[in-house]
Image: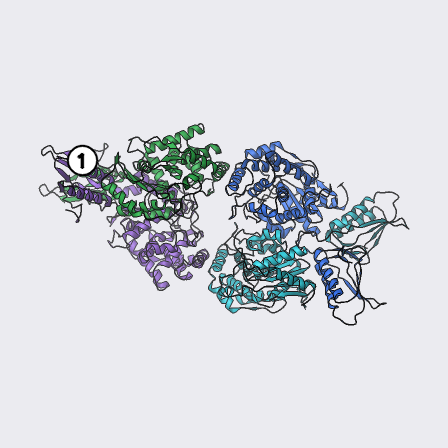
Chain colours: A purple, B green, C cyan, D blue
Amino acid sequence: MDVSTGPVTDALHRVLAEVSPNTAGELATHIPELADEDPDRLAVALASTEGRCYHAGDAGHRFTLQSLSKPFVYALALTDRDVDEVHEHVGFEPSGEPFNSISLDAAGRPDNPMINAGAIVTSSLVRATDAIERSARILEILSAFAGRDLEMDEKVYASEQDNGDRNHALAHLARASGVLASGVDEAVDAYFRQCSILVDTRDLAVMAATLADEGINPMTGRRVVSEVCARHTLSLMVSCGMYDGAGEWMMRVGIPAKSGVSGGIVAVKPGQFGIGVFSPRLDEKGNSARGVEVLQELSDAYGLHLLRRPTAPAGPLVEEDADSGAHVLRPRGELDFVEVEAVVHDLWSRTTEEGEAQLSLDLSAVTALSVVAHDLLQEALRHLRDAGRAIEVLDPGGVLGDDEE
Amino acid sequence: MDVSTGPVTDALHRVLAEVSPNTAGELATHIPELADEDPDRLAVALASTEGRCYHAGDAGHRFTLQSLSKPFVYALALTDRDVDEVHEHVGFEPSGEPFNSISLDAAGRPDNPMINAGAIVTSSLVRATDAIERSARILEILSAFAGRDLEMDEKVYASEQDNGDRNHALAHLARASGVLASGVDEAVDAYFRQCSILVDTRDLAVMAATLADEGINPMTGRRVVSEVCARHTLSLMVSCGMYDGAGEWMMRVGIPAKSGVSGGIVAVKPGQFGIGVFSPRLDEKGNSARGVEVLQELSDAYGLHLLRRPTAPAGPLVEEDADSGAHVLRPRGELDFVEVEAVVHDLWSRTTEEGEAQLSLDLSAVTALSVVAHDLLQEALRHLRDAGRAIEVLDPGGVLGDDEE
Amino acid sequence: MDVSTGPVTDALHRVLAEVSPNTAGELATHIPELADEDPDRLAVALASTEGRCYHAGDAGHRFTLQSLSKPFVYALALTDRDVDEVHEHVGFEPSGEPFNSISLDAAGRPDNPMINAGAIVTSSLVRATDAIERSARILEILSAFAGRDLEMDEKVYASEQDNGDRNHALAHLARASGVLASGVDEAVDAYFRQCSILVDTRDLAVMAATLADEGINPMTGRRVVSEVCARHTLSLMVSCGMYDGAGEWMMRVGIPAKSGVSGGIVAVKPGQFGIGVFSPRLDEKGNSARGVEVLQELSDAYGLHLLRRPTAPAGPLVEEDADSGAHVLRPRGELDFVEVEAVVHDLWSRTTEEGEAQLSLDLSAVTALSVVAHDLLQEALRHLRDAGRAIEVLDPGGVLGDDEE
Amino acid sequence: MDVSTGPVTDALHRVLAEVSPNTAGELATHIPELADEDPDRLAVALASTEGRCYHAGDAGHRFTLQSLSKPFVYALALTDRDVDEVHEHVGFEPSGEPFNSISLDAAGRPDNPMINAGAIVTSSLVRATDAIERSARILEILSAFAGRDLEMDEKVYASEQDNGDRNHALAHLARASGVLASGVDEAVDAYFRQCSILVDTRDLAVMAATLADEGINPMTGRRVVSEVCARHTLSLMVSCGMYDGAGEWMMRVGIPAKSGVSGGIVAVKPGQFGIGVFSPRLDEKGNSARGVEVLQELSDAYGLHLLRRPTAPAGPLVEEDADSGAHVLRPRGELDFVEVEAVVHDLWSRTTEEGEAQLSLDLSAVTALSVVAHDLLQEALRHLRDAGRAIEVLDPGGVLGDDEE
C-alpha cells in the first residue's frame, strides 16, 4: 500500500530538501546510458514490514539495478545451495579494493559476493540447466523481492556486453581457479542481465523491506527467501555492502546497505523497514553522493544505527503485594536477556530460602520474549519446581509458549 | 556482583563442556610467555548491563590483553580527540591483511585501529605530555573498563620490547607519513605496555559489558566513555574486530567482538551484556579456536545475532470501545518505527474524516519508545490538533516525554 | 652445417655429463602433454654465427616452444610496428611476479612481453587481417628463425585451449585497458598456436644464433629481422627473460636467455653463437633445472658473461723508427675506445709541438674499428691536418672507411 | 690524468650542448639541501681504463652521493662476505616498485641492494666492530673508488637523520625478518653517512672506471675490489640500477648504470671507461632527466650498447702457400669463439685425412685470445698431435700461453 501523506512522508520530503543542494560527485560513465542520466534526479522511499510504502521525489523514475542486484542474487544462490557450498566458491571478506578489482583470495575465491568477480561467481551458483533458465530465475526472484514483474533494459544490456572485457576476465580467472559453477559466457551473461533490470526507488524500498521482514515481501505477503538467507544477506551487506567504505558506513550510518553505480542505494533496518534512495551522482568510492547523505541524515535523526540500544529498558517490577504479602514479579514489554535476567536471578535465589512468601510471576504486560529470555525463564521455573517451591505464573498472552504451562 | 549458580551459569558451563574436546590450533609463539601458557585452559564469563557477572571455567586465570587492548584504547583516543581528528590519522576499513601487516592506505594512514600499525597510532593520539602520563592514562581507562586496578606483566613487556622490530617499523612508517601524534618510541612503548596488562576472563566480560551499557561500567556504575564513543568502538569491532575474518564472523556470530593472541575474545550484545572467553590455542587467523566456538554456540543457542529480529512484535491494538463507541489505540511494549507506524497511519487518516467517533490513545502498556517512534507519534498528535480533532492521550508512564502533554 | 665431432662437441658432451646426475625439479603439469614428457631427457646445441651447429644428447627430440616463442614473436611485432608503438601496448620492465600473473602497470599495459599477458598483447600486434594470417605469419617467422619449416602439435594446442581460462582472462583485461590490438579470441588463439609449435634443441640453437648474428640466420644466410629488432629482443631477454629470476641470472650466467615450461632454454652470446638446452624438469621458478646448470657451467668455463672484458687488450705500439727518426704508431687488432684513445691522445698532443719528427700511423695490423674508435681517430687526423701537421697513414685493409683517405 | 682538450673532450662538450635546453624534471625535495641545488648545473666526465679523465661542464661542482653510494658499498659487502652470504640477506631481483618501497621477498629479504631497504642491509653486512669502524670503512672504500679522500656533508647528514623515519622503518623490518646484520641504528646511520658523502662529476667517472677496469682504479693503479666483485656489482646495476626503469634503460642505453636523487648517474662500459653525469632535475622515476639524455646520446652516437657486436669480425685467413703447398691458417686480431671456431673446425677435419700437405698455424697477427678461444685452440692442437699429424705453430706474441709449446 502506497501512502502519500503523513509524518513519514513529511520526514522523507524534509530529508530530500536538506540534501538537494548537494551537487557533488559525477555520473558513472563506463556505460553510455548511465552517463546520459539526469544528474539532478533525487528520490527516496521507505517500505515498512507492515506493508506500507512511503516516498518522496522521483520515486517512479526507473534506472537499472547494476550492483544493487548483487545481494538479492546472492540470496537466491544461498537458497539453491547451502551457505557452505556457496562460500567454497566465494569468500566472506571485504576486499579493501575497488569493486571491479580482481581480488581473489589464497583459495582462488573472489573476496566476496559484492565485488564483480564474486557476483559473477554467485550468478553461476544459481541452479539452472542453461543460460535462459538462469536469467529467468534471477529475474523471477528479483521480481519477487520487488513485488512486481520487473523487466530488463535491452540497451543497457547491450552496452554492458560492449564494455564487458573486464567482467569476462574476472569470470575466466574464477573459472581458472575452479570456483565458477557454470560456463564463462553463461555466468557473465546472467550477470549483465541482472545488472540491466529496471527498477524505481519504490521497488528498492520494497526489496529492502523484504530483507527487513526476514525474507517475506511485506507488500505481497509472499516468502521470497528463508529467514536465514535473508539474515546472511544482511550480514554480508554489513561487511561488504558499501564498496571499500564499509567500515566508515558502519560507524556513520550503521545499517546494512548496498549501492549501485546507477545511483541507487538500498538500506535495511531489520524487522522494521527497507529504504531505497536514488541520486545518480557518485562520490569517489562509487556510492551515490546524495544517497549516502540521505541515509546519514535518516540514521542520525531517527537513531537507526544497529548498535544503538533502541530504548532505555523498562526494568522488571518486583513488589511485595500489600494484601497477600506475596512476592510478585511483573516484567513488562519486550524481554531480552537483560530484562529477564533480573527476574531469573530473583527467582533462583529464592529456591533455597526457607519460609518464603508466596511467589507470583505476572507476564500479562510482556509483549514479547527473546530466545535467550524465554530459555532462561523456563529454566528458572523448572528449577523452582524441582526444588519444591510453588510459583503462580500468569501468562494470558501465552508468551511462554507451548512447552510450559 | 558475581553469581556462581543459576541458569546463566549453567548455560556457560554447558557451552564449555561442548567445546572442551576441541584441541585444534596452536599457541602464539612470538613471545615466550605466550608459548608457555597452559594450552588447555578454558574460561567464559558474562556480565550483564544490570551489573551481574556469571562465569565458568578458569575465569580467574590471568593473561595479558595483547590486541584486546585495542578497542578500549581506541575509545580513549576518541574521548581525547573527536572522531574526525582520530580518523585523520587512522582509517576505518578492514585491511584484508594480517594484523601485523603494514597496510597504509592512500593517505598514509594505517587501515584501521585494530591492526598493529593503527593501534600504535591510536595510542599516540591519547592526550599526554610524556610517555609516563600516556601509559598511566591508558592503564587508568583500561582499569575503569574492568572495574578494578589492573597491573602490567613486566616479563611480557620486556619480551614485547625484545621482539619489537616490526612494531617499531610500523611506528616509523606512520611517522614518515605524518599520522603519528607522538614520538616513535613513546608510541611503541605505550602500545607494548597496554598489550602487557594482565586481566582475567571475568575482567573481559566487564570491559565488554561497559561497551554494551553505552560506556557505563555496570559493576561500578561509573561512566568510562561517552555513549557515542562506545558506539563508535562497537562499530569498529563489527568491521575490523576479528582480524581478517570479520565478514565470516558477522555471518556466523553477528555481534561485535575483538580477539587477542593471548587467547581471549571480548564480545558485546549492545544494551544487554558483555562476554569474555579465554582459550589460548589460536586458529590460523590468530583467533582463539575454542573462543570462536563458544561464541558461535552462544549466538546460535540464544539468537544473539545483531540482524536477528529480537522477537515477533506485538501489534498495536486498535479497538472500538463497546460502551462509548470511542476509537481506542492501545500499543504495548517497546515501540520502534514499525510498531508505531500503524498507530500513526491510523491517526493521520482520521484528521480529514468527518463525524468521527472520539479518539483515544492509551500508552499505559508502552514500556519504551524509540527516537523515530517518539518523533512520529508527536508529529501525528500535533497534526491532529492542528486539524482540530480532539484526542485523549493516556500516558501514565510519561513515555512521550516533557515536550508533549 | 651440423658438426658431430671436435672440441666444441666434446665440450658439450662434457657439460651434459656433469649435469646428468641432477634430478631436481618437477615436470610442468598444467597441460597433460607436458606432464607426459620423459623427465630424463637432456640435450644441448650450439650454433655459431659462422653457420655451424654442434650438439650433444637428445638434440633431435621435439617439444613445444611454450614461452620460448615469446622473444621471437616480439621481434616480429617490432618488425611490424616501431618500438614506441609496441611499447605503448606493453611495458619494458620485469614484473617481480610469476609469468602468469596479471601485472598490468599504471597505464594498463602488461609489465613486459615475456609474461603471458604481455605475450598475448605482443601477438595481437603482429600485422594481420585475420586470425589465420596472424598465426601463419607467426609460424613463418619462427620457421625463418629456425631455418626450417616448423609445425604445430595439435594435441598440445587443444590442451592449451582446454586450460586457457587464465590466458583468456589476461587478454580480456588487456582489451579492457585498451592495449590489445586485436580481438580477444584471435590474440589468445595466436598465442596458443605459437606455444604449440614443435622444435628440437638444435632448432633452439639456430633461433638463438639468429639473434646473435643481429637478425641473420647463419645457417640459411637469410635476414629474419633487422639488427635493431634483434638487439631490442636481446635487451628484453636480459631484463625479463628468466621469469622472476632475471637478476640472479645476470649475476650468475650473464648472457641474454629465455626459458619455457616445456624445459627448453635459449641463450645468446651476441656476435658469437646461440645455445639451446633441453631438460624438462623445472625448478621452482619454472626454468629447466638442468638447463640452468648447463648454462652456468658453460658461462663459467668459457667466460661468456657479457660484463667480462673479453681479453686483455693489446696496447698500441708507439715507437721511434730507428732509421728515419719518424714517430710511428702501430695499433693492432680490434680497436675500441680505450685502444684508440691512447693513439688519439698522442696524435692530439703533437699538433702544437714545434720541430716534430715525421708522424706515421700504421693501421695494417688493425682488424676492426668500433664506431667510437673510428670517429675519434678521424677526428684526430682531421685536427692534425687543420693544424698543418703532416701525417702518413697506412691503411691497407681500409679500416678507416671511405670518408677518409 | 685530466685531459682538457681533444676529440673526447669535444664530444663531451657537444653532448652537453645538445641536452642543455632540456629543463624538464624537478629537484628532489625530501631534503632541504637537495631542494636548494642550482637546477641548471650540468656536467659530464669520462675516465678511461687507461687512466685519463675527460670532462665538460661543472665537473668540479660537489654534491652528495645519495643512492650512487649503493653499488660501491655493495662491492665492499661482497668483499667482506661471499656472494652467497650477502644474498642470504638481500635479493637479486628488480622490485618493480619505487626505491623507498618496502619490497621484502618471500624470504623476508629486501628485493635487491639498490632499493633503500636493501642498501641498509648491505651496509649492515660491511665487517665492523662498531658504528664508527663501519662508516670509516665505507668512507675508505668510496675514497679508493674515487682515487682521493672524500668527505661527508654534515648538513645533509643531519637532514637525512631528521627525515629518516622511513629508512628506520625499513631497517626494523629487515631486522624483524632476520636479515639485518647489525643493530638498526648502526645500519641506518652508516647508510645516511654514505648518502652524505660529497663527490664531483669527475669522481663519479673515476669510480665508474674502477668498475670498468675490473676493480682497479685506473688513476691510482690500486686494486679496490676483486674482479668478481666488480662484475657482480655491474650485473646488479644492469638488473636494478635505474630504479624501476631498468628494462627500458637496457633497451635504450644498454650499459650498467646507477642514479641518485642528487642528480648524478654513473655508467660503465666494461673494459673501456666509466662515465659520470650530473644534472639535478629528476624525471618521474627519480633519475636525472638530462643525465639520462646524455647517456642515451653517447650510447647512440658511439655504439656503447652491451649487446651491440662491437665490430664486424675479421675472418681467419686460410690459404695454400704457393711455394711450399703448405696449408696455412692466419687468424688476426682478437679471437673469441666464433673467430677461432673456423680454425679449429679446419684443423679438426684434417686429422683423419691421408696424404695431407703440411699444416701451419700462424698466430703472429693475433692480438688476444678469449678463454673459450684459447681452450678450443689448445684442444684442437692436442687432438692433431694425438692423431699423429704434424703442425707448425708460429706464436711470436705468446698468445697461447705457457701451457703449450
The answer to whether residue A183 is above or below residue B333 is: below
Locate residue C72 relative to residue B328 in the image: left or right: right
Q: Residues within 10 Å of mark 1 (few under 14, many from 20)?
A: some
Screen quadrant of the N terminus of chain B:
top left
Q: Secondary structure at mark 1?
A: strand
Residue furthest to the bottom = D354
Residue C109 coordinates in the image, percent (x, y): 53, 53
Residue C75 coordinates in the image, percent (x, y): 61, 60
Query: Would residue A63 be seen by someone viewing this image from the given angle?
Result: no
Locate residue B152 relative to residue C240 in the image: left or right: left
The residue lying toward the viewer, choosing from D384 and D19, is D384
The answer to whether residue D319 is above or below residue A353 is: below
Numbered marks: total: 1
The answer to whether residue D185 is above or below residue C277 is: above
Amino acid type, label 1: Leu
Locate residue A88 relative to residue C202 in the image: left or right: left
Q: Which residue is mark 1?
A: A317
The answer to which quarter of the image holds residue D125 is top right
Residue furthest to the right = C323
Screen quadrant of the C terminus of chain B:
top left
Chain ID at mark 1: A
Query: Would residue A288 be seen by someone viewing this image from the given angle?
Result: yes
The residue lying toward the viewer, choosing from D387 and A202, is D387
Residue C236 coordinates in the image, percent (x, y): 60, 55
The residue lying toward the viewer, choosing from C62 and A32, is C62
Q: Looking at the image, which residue is at 62% across and 51% down?
A: C251
Residue B249 coordinates in the image, percent (x, y): 35, 47
